Each structure stands twice: as structure tokens, then as C-alpha cells.
Amino acid sequence: MERTVRRVHRLCQPDPEVLVKPSIEQSARTTHIIAAAIAASVPIYMVVAWLVAPTVAAAADNDELVPLLAGILAVLSAGHLVLAQLLFLSRVRAAAQLPTPEQRLAAYRVAVIIAFALREAVAIYGLVLGFLSGDPRWAFGFGSVALVSMVFGWPRGSTMGRLASEVPSIGV
């Protein structure tokens, strides 16, 4: 009887590998959907600039403002791209220290969202310049830079798998 109880107990115990794997796949899918949604907004900004910018700029005379603003927004964009990568790496390192795989994967997802939002801001700067200048090429240029940075910063399943399986290191 005792042997049967132990066998049943062993059969009823979930395998840790089985428990972690769906969590990794579900988290990866969710993270990829969020990243894709943010990235999908960039081509929409480009289309809006192409359709609307020439008509909006005709109403205002911004010839002196655009070159100055273009320089400022270009510098801000470069800063955003650097900051996006630095914050992402910092948050991933911090995520590796969390105690459970679920917490580590959630922290990774937050890192991706923050980095992608900063990259998306670059495209928004281009949209603003396109509206002010009446030239949608600003939106195309800044938007293209944003998309390329999103492609290079795309969330990696291998990183999520590593975060889900790592035992956190305890700092002293």
C-alpha cells in the first residue's frame, strides 16, 4: 500500500521542466506581440506623415524653426537610442537577480517595453518634423532609424529561456 501511495504521489508531482517551458513560450509570445505592436506603429506614422504633412505645413510658416528643431531632435534621438540600449541591458541584468522565473521574464518584458518606447519616440520626432516642415521624408528617415534599432533590439527567445532557467545569483 505504501509503495502504491509513493508511486501515485510521484506521478502526481509536476515535472519542473514542464512547468517552466509553457511559461517561457507564453512570455516570449506576449513579449513579441508587444514589441510587434510598438514597431507596427512606426510605419503608420510614416503613412500619416506622407498623407498629412504637406497639407499641415502649408498653413504655417516654419522655415526658420525646422532646421533648428531638426538638429535638436536628431541629438535627442541619438540619446534615446543609446539610452534605450543602456536601460535595456541594465534591466536585464537586474531581472537575472530576481528569485523566480516568472518575475525574471516579467522584468525582461518591461525592459523590452521601455526600450521599444524610447525607440518609438525617434519615429515620433520624425513625424513632428514632417508636420512642421511639410516634408514627410523626415518621418521616413527618423522612422527608418527607429525600425532598424527595433530589429536589432528584438526580444530574443534564447535570452528569455536563459532567464527562465537561471538560478539567480545572490549578491553580498
Image (tube, rainbow, N blue to C red):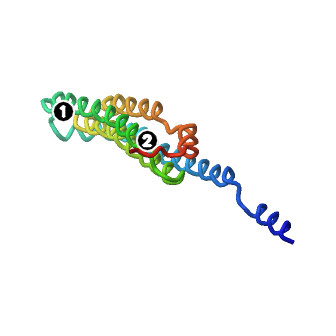
Q: Which mark is residue 92?
A: 2
Nearer to us of marks 2 and 1 is: 2
SS under mark 1: helix
Residue 42: image quadrant is: top left
Residue 57: which numbered mark, if any?
A: none
When the figure is inspected, residue 143 is found, relative to residue 10, above or below; the finding is above
Amino acid type of the residue tagged 1 in the rendering: Leu
Mark yes or no: residue 54 visible.
Answer: no
Q: For the point 47% across and 43% down, which residue is it?
A: 169
> Residue beneath label 1, please?
69
Cα separation between marks 2 and 1: 34 Å
The answer to whether the residue labelled 2 contacts the one labelled 1, judged by CB atoms less than 8 Å apart, is: no
Q: Where the C terminus falls, by quadrant?
A: top left
Horizontal side of 86 relative to 69 (left or right) equals right
Q: Position of residue 108 (x, y in %)?
A: 46, 46
Q: Residue, x 39% and y 39% (percent of image)?
A: 88
Choose between 61 and 156: the one closer to the eye.
156
- Horizontal side of 22 relative to 92 (left or right) equals right
Q: Earlier in the sequence, mark 2 or mark 1?
A: 1
Above or below, 167 against 149 in this view is below
Q: Residue at x 29, y 30 (%)?
A: 78
Task: Pinpoint residue 158: horizontal percent, then vertical percent.
Answer: 57, 37
Is 82 on the left-hand or right-hand side of 104? left
